[in-house]
Image: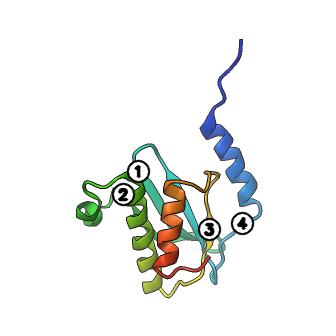
Amino acid sequence: MLSKIDKNESRKKRHLRIRKKISGTSEAPRLNIFRSSSHIYAQIIDDVKEVTLVSSSTQLKDLEKALKGKTKVEQAKVIGKDIAEKALKLKIEKVVFDRAGYVYAGRVAALAEAAREAGLKF
């Protein structure tokens, strides 16, 4: 009998392969994303100190009005802009983008492009 491929398990393996090469430093922390079926999360992480510097997600109460009535791709754009603004307040301009094994399309690409437009460099 054929077994169905677990897409999330495959994504996790890809993410581990990527993480062997990508690491965030104090000068260029890592912009990590996580995409669930209904939400998207973004964090800027300093892997040397093992600290999350900035985070944003579609579940934040202060972004509730900005996200209401928007599609998931539009919500990802709002999150990308929000995380970039928070990072720039902490004087973080350059980051390393970690797509966490997801295909660079749809919500992932929308978040990345919005963060670039808001001033982050990667």
Q: Look at mark 4 in the image and give the residue it sits on.
A: 22
Q: Which residue is drawn at 69% across and 69% down?
A: 23
Label 2 secondary element: loop
Res. 86 image quadrant: bottom left
Q: Is residue 119 above or below residue 40?
A: below
Q: Earlier in the sequence, mark 2 or mark 1?
A: 1
Whether label 2 touches label 3, CB < 8 Å: no
**Going by the image, does 51 lie left or right of 14?**
left
Q: Which residue is drawn at 45% across and 68% down?
A: 80
Neighbor class of circle 4 (other Cα within 10 Å; few <14, some 14-19, many 20+) is: some
Res. 19 image quadrant: bottom right
Residue kind at label 1, given as amino acid type: His
Whether label 2 touches label 1, CB < 8 Å: yes
**Going by the image, does 62 lie left or right of 109?**
left
Q: Look at mark 3 in the image and give the residue it sits on.
A: 97
Neighbor class of circle 3 (other Cα within 10 Å; few <14, some 14-19, many 20+) is: some
**Going by the image, does 43 lie left or right of 23?**
left
Marks 3/1: CA distance? Answer: 19 Å
Q: Look at mark 2 in the image and give the residue it sits on.
A: 58
Q: Earlier in the sequence, mark 2 or mark 3?
A: 2
Tell which of 106 and 25 is nearer to you: 106
Q: Look at mark 1 in the image and give the residue it sits on.
A: 39
